[in-house]
Amino acid sequence: SGADVTIRLDLGMGRANATVWTCDLSHDYVTINGKYRT
């Protein structure tokens, strides 16, 4: 896992927060995992 990244935006609409989880879809990841068959 990589480091946490904090992004702050001021849209002038009050306060809120959210957590976003992402995944690695790099070329190497797709190449390695594309070999699996279901």
Image (tube, rainbow, N blue to C red):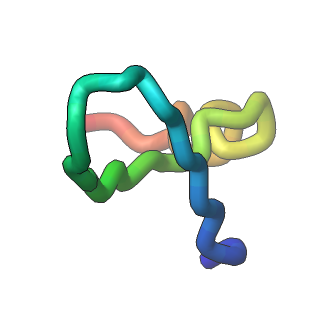
- In the image, residue 22 above or below residue 26: below
Q: Quadrant of the N terminus?
A: bottom right
Pick whichever, 36 or 9, lies toward us: 9
**Image vertical order of residue 20 relative to residue 6, above or below:** above
Q: Which residue: 48% across, 32% down?
A: 10
Is 5 drawn above or below residue 29 in the view shown? Answer: below
- Say which residue appears at 24% left-offset and 48% top-offset: 15
Residue drawn at the location 55% of the way across and 47% of the way down = 8
Percent of width and height locating residue 34: 53, 32
> Left or right: where does residue 1 sit relative to residue 36?
right
- Viewer-closest of 4 and 14: 14
Residue 25 x %, y % = 60, 35
In the current view of this chain or complex, which residue is farthest to the right? 28
Residue 3, located in which quarter of the rendered image?
A: bottom right
Count of all numbered marks drawn on residues in the image: 0
Left or right of 31? Residue 14 is left
- Horizontal and vertical percent position of residue 30: 62, 33
Residue 38: give x, y in percent of width and height: 21, 37
Looking at the image, which is closer to me, 17 or 2?
17
User: Which image quadrant is residue 36 in?
Assistant: top left
